[in-house]
Image (cartoon, grey):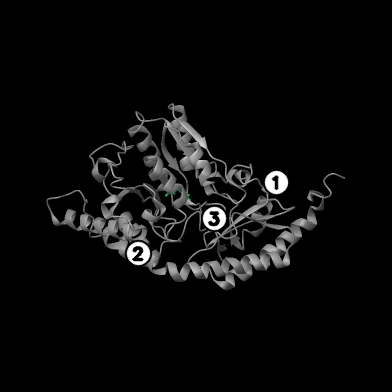
């Protein structure tokens, strides 16, 4: 049986062939420990790690020594939040974030609340954007950190980071961004965005799973301190101990380089395919609503509500044709509507009908056309089966 078309690139991406090629020597002959200083096995591993640091920092306009390797963006987010909270708790106990962040941020914030920190969850507008003025107004003398994600992983909305960054800079508050869904897809420049800490994941950018990075600005002008979350050996300048995942790190570096090379062409192509998908669906189906921002949106994302259709029924009926999800893979077990969809104020009768289309590097026009046909057919059938679910007839 043919496998379904993959349109779930926000959940994970396939490994790029060039990335696998770059990693292969470090999974075989070049197996050294990057911390071994006394022989060539260690030296070649260390050299490969430093090359990766350069490739990653080039993509986000940082310096190689500002990159800390982690086991993935979940750890990067934990290290940023807990690391700042614990290092700066004498200065204040207040952190600002938003309700549409990834669970790696939200669950860490809940943990910090139990530890006595106060968290402000700023509202987002109906497109999913935080208002920079709200950030300004929420900052108190107790505030030590603002954390706002760059691109939302469900609705693709791009946050106004440089405006928020300017405010945090002016007020002397640290600024972190979970940039897992933006790095490698749209230009990210840590100086333009005025961020101090930024989380990256390997497997969302055609690199391997289980590896990520945290960018930590070196001077601001004073040095940023992070309390480590993992102790033992003092690797990564004492911020993150543990033997470095050399093949994974090499893969992450190469994935960044490939993204940088392909981005100008790929982002245009994916934007056009996304537009084709949106136009195809909305010209043939009525009552299809766009979630997220019409303009400030990452090219590969389309999130739609199909009124009078349950997301689960639609996903199930499409499962042989196209691999999709309603929202974040981390929360897709629950039958609650997505918390992101709820936070942007989608009407309750529509919230259960949100579907996320995540286009990627290998998505073709022919695939998009097949997906349009399949979605139109299934939505029409589900609507015909359940006319009583229509909002107009629900009161009669
Ligand atoms: C996938 C994702 C993460 C988690 O990254 P891992 O490397 O899988 O731990 C964090 N934030 C966002 C926005 C994500 O999409």
Q: Which mark is residue 156?
A: 3
The mark lying in front, picked from 3 and 2, is: 3
Q: Judging from the image, what secondary structure is the residue with disc 1 in?
A: loop
Considering every residue shown, the one lying at the far front of the view is 170
Name the quadrant of the C terminus.
top right
Q: Give the x, y percent position of residue 207.
A: 39, 59
Q: Residues within 10 Å of mark 1 (few under 14, many from 20)?
A: few
Question: Dividing the picture into quarters, in which one does residue 19 lie?
Answer: bottom left
Distance from mark 2 CB to nearest ligand 1 atom below 8 Å: no
Give the SS element for disc 3.
loop
Q: Distance of mark 1 from mark 3, alpha carbons? A: 19 Å
Q: Which mark is residue 155?
A: none
Q: Which residue is mark 1?
A: 347
Residue 257's tag is 2
Would you say 180 lies left or right of 231 here? right
**Residue at horizontal 46 percent and vertical 50 percent from the top:** 163
Q: Nearer the viewer, residue 116 or 73?
A: 116
Quarter occupied by the N terminus: bottom right
Q: Furthest residue to the left?
A: 38
Residue 227 falls in image quadrant = top left
């Amino acid at each position: 049986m043919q496998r379904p078309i993959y349109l779930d690139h926000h959940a994970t991406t396939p490994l790029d062939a060039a990335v696998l090629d770059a990693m292969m020597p470090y999974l075989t002959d070049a197996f050294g420990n990057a911390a071994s200083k006394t022989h060539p096995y260690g030296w070649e591993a260390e050299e490969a790690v430093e090359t990766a640091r350069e490739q990653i920092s080039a993509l986000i306009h940082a310096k190689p020594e500002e990159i800390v390797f982690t086991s993935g963006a979940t750890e990067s987010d934990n290290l940023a939040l807990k690391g700042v909270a614990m290092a700066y708790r004498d200065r204040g106990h207040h952190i600002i974030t938003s309700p549409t962040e990834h669970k790696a941020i939200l669950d860490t914030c809940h943990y910090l609340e139990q530890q006595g920190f106060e968290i402000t969850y700023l509202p987002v507008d109906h497109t999913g954007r935080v208002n920079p003025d709200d950030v300004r107004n929420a900052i108190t003398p107790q505030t030590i950190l603002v954390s706002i994600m760059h691109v939302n992983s469900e609705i693709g909305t791009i946050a106004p980071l440089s405006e928020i960054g300017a405010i945090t800079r002016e007020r002397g508050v640290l600024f972190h961004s979970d940039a897992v869904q933006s790095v490698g897809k749209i230009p990210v420049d840590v100086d333009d965005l005025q961020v101090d800490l930024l989380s990256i994941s390997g497997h969302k950018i055609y690199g391997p799973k289980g590896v990520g990075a945290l960018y930590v600005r070196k001077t601001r002008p004073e040095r940023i301190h992070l309390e480590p979350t993992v102790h033992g050996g003092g690797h990564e300048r004492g911020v993150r101990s543990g033997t470095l995942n050399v093949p994974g790190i090499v893969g992450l570096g190469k994935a960044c380089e490939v993204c940088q090379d392909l981005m100008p062409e790929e982002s245009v192509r994916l934007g056009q395919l996304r537009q084709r998908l949106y136009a195809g669906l909305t010209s043939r189906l009525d009552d299809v609503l766009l979630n997220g921002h019409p303009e400030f949106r990452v090219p590969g994302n389309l999130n739609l509500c199909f009124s009078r259709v349950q997301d689960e029924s639609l996903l199930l009926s499409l499962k042989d044709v196209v691999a999709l999800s309603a929202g974040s893979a981390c929360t897709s077990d629950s039958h609650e509507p997505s918390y992101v969809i709820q936070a942007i104020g989608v009407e309750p009768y529509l919230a259960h009908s949100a579907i996320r289309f995540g286009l990627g590097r290998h998505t073709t026009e022919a695939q998009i056309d097949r997906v349009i046909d399949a979605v139109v057919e299934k939505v029409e059938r589900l609507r015909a089966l359940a006319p009583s679910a229509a909002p107009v007839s629900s009161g009669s």
